[in-house]
Image (spheres, grey):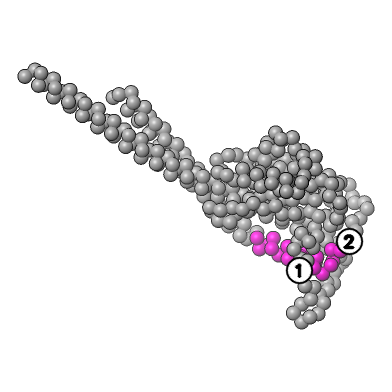
C-alpha cells in the first residue's frame, strides 16, 4: 500500500481515538452539569429567602446607623463591619475561573469582562486586589503583575458550603482590616446549556443601593409603615444574618460559575466530537479515492502486461 494511503489510514485511526476521548469527556461534563443543576435549583430557594430578608431590612432602614463594635474576640469576624461605607481607595475583585482548560471560551470571557470592569472603573493595578478562585484566573493576573491577596484552587465539581466558609471568613477579615474598601464578585452566570453571561456583582459593603432595595416601599398594601420588632437586639440579629448573606452570595456565585463551566465544557467537547466526525468523513473519502486510483492503476498495468505477452 502506498505511503500516502498509510498516512491517511493513520490519521483516520488517530482522529477516531480523539473523537472517542472527546465523546467520553462530553458525557462526563453532561453528567456533572445534571448533578450540579439539581443542587443549584434547591439552593436558589434558600439564597432567595436570605436576600429577601436582607433587602427588606435595608428598606425598613434597620441597616442604617448600625455601628460595628470597636473590639471583637481574637479570631472572630466583625460581621457588622460589612455595613461600613468608606471612601474607595482599593477595590477587591473575586474572580471565579476554572482550574483546567477544555472549557471553550468560559475562562477567556470571565477574564476579558473582568479586565473591562477594571478599565471601566478607571482602576490601575495598584488600586485592585484580586481574590482568585480557580487556577486559570490566578495565573493570568499573576503574570500581569496584579496583587493576589487570596487564592483558592481545586474547587469541587459540585462545591460544598463547607468549602465556601473559610473563603468568606478570609474576605471579611480583609475588608474589616481595610485591605480593600469595596468588593465585587466576577463570574459567568449560567443561562442555558449553550449560553452564559458575565456578572460583576457588588458584595461589600452591604447597602440598600447595591441590594436594589432603594425602590422598595417601606409600607404594605394597607398603607401602614412596616416596622420590625427584634429580639434580642438588632445588632445580635444582624451579626447572624449578615454572614449568612455573604456566604449565600459567594456560594451561589460559585455554584452558578461551576454550572456554566460544565455546560461550556460539554458544548466544547460536543463540538470537538462533531469536528472529529467531519475530519474522519473527509479522510475516508480521500482514502477511498486514493485506493480506487491505486487499484485502477494496478489493473491497467496487469492488462498492459498481459497484452504484451500475447
State the SS at label 2: loop
- Quarter of the image for residue 292 reads top left
Graded by Cα atoms within 10 Å as few (under 14), some (14 to 19) or many (20 or more), the crowding at tag 2 reads: some
Instruction: Please name which of the two marks, 1 or 2, marks the residue nearer to the observer.
Output: 1
Q: Earlier in the sequence, mark 1 or mark 2?
A: 2
Q: Is residue 179 left or right of residue 302?
A: right
Residue closer to the observer: 35 or 264: 264
Residue 57 colored magenta? yes
Task: For the N terminus, give its image quadrant.
Answer: top left
Query: Residue 22: x percent and y percent?
Result: 47, 41
- Quarter of the image for residue 191 reads bottom right
Q: Is residue 266 left or right of residue 56?
A: left
Dominant SS of magenta comes to helix
Query: Residue 78: x percent and y percent?
Result: 86, 53
Q: Which residue is mark 2?
A: 66
Residue at the location (76% across, 59% down)? 210
Q: Which residue is mark 1?
A: 215
**Whether residue 115 is visible:** yes
Identify whether 213 is placed above or below 97.
below
Magenta-colored span = 44-64
Task: For the C terminus, give its image quadrant.
Answer: top left
**Whether residue 166 is visible:** no
Query: Residue 154: x percent and y percent?
Result: 65, 41
Residue at the location (54% across, 45% down)? 265
Query: Residue 76: x percent and y percent?
Result: 85, 49
- Residue 198's tag is none
Check the image and name the residue furthest to the bottom. Answer: 222
Check the image and name the residue furthest to the left. Answer: 310
- Quarter of the image for residue 133 reads top right
Residue at the location (60% across, 39% down)? 100
Amino acid at each position: 500500500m502506498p505511503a500516502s494511503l498509510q498516512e491517511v489510514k493513520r490519521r483516520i485511526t488517530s482522529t477516531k481515538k480523539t473523537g472517542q476521548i472527546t465523546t467520553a469527556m462530553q458525557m462526563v461534563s453532561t453528567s456533572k452539569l445534571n448533578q450540579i443543576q439539581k443542587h443549584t435549583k434547591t439552593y436558589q430557594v434558600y439564597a432567595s429567602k436570605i436576600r429577601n430578608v436582607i433587602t427588606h431590612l435595608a428598606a425598613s432602614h434597620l441597616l442604617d446607623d448600625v455601628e460595628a463594635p470597636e473590639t471583637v474576640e481574637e479570631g472572630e469576624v466583625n460581621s457588622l463591619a460589612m455595613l461600613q461605607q468608606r471612601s474607595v481607595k482599593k477595590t477587591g475583585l473575586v474572580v471565579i475561573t476554572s482550574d483546567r482548560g477544555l472549557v471553550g471560551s468560559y475562562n477567556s470571557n470571565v477574564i476579558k469582562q473582568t479586565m473591562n470592569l477594571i478599565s471601566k472603573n478607571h482602576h490601575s493595578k495598584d488600586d485592585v486586589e484580586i481574590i482568585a478562585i480557580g487556577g486559570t484566573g490566578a495565573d493570568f493576573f499573576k503574570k500581569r503583575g496584579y496583587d493576589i491577596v487570596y487564592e483558592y484552587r481545586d474547587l469541587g465539581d459540585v462545591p460544598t458550603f463547607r468549602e465556601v466558609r473559610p473563603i468568606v471568613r478570609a474576605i471579611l477579615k480583609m475588608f474589616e482590616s481595610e485591605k480593600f474598601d469595596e468588593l465585587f464578585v466576577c463570574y459567568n452566570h449560567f443561562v442555558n446549556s449553550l449560553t452564559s453571561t458575565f456578572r460583576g456583582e457588588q458584595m461589600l459593603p452591604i447597602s440598600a443601593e447595591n441590594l436594589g432595595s432603594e425602590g422598595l416601599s417601606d409600607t404594605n398594601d394597607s398603607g401602614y409603615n412596616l416596622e420590625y420588632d427584634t429580639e434580642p437586639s438588632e445588632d445580635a440579629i444582624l451579626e447572624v444574618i449578615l454572614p449568612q448573606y455573604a456566604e449565600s452570595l459567594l456560594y451561589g456565585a460559585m455554584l452558578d460559575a461551576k454550572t456554566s463551566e460544565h455546560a461550556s465544557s460539554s458544548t466544547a467537547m460536543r463540538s470537538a466530537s462533531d469536528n472529529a466526525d467531519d475530519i474522519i468523513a473527509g479522510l475516508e473519502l480521500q482514502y477511498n479515492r486514493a485506493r480506487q486510483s491505486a487499484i485502477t492503476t494496478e489493473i491497467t498495468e496487469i492488462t498492459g502486461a498481459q497484452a504484451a505477452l500475447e
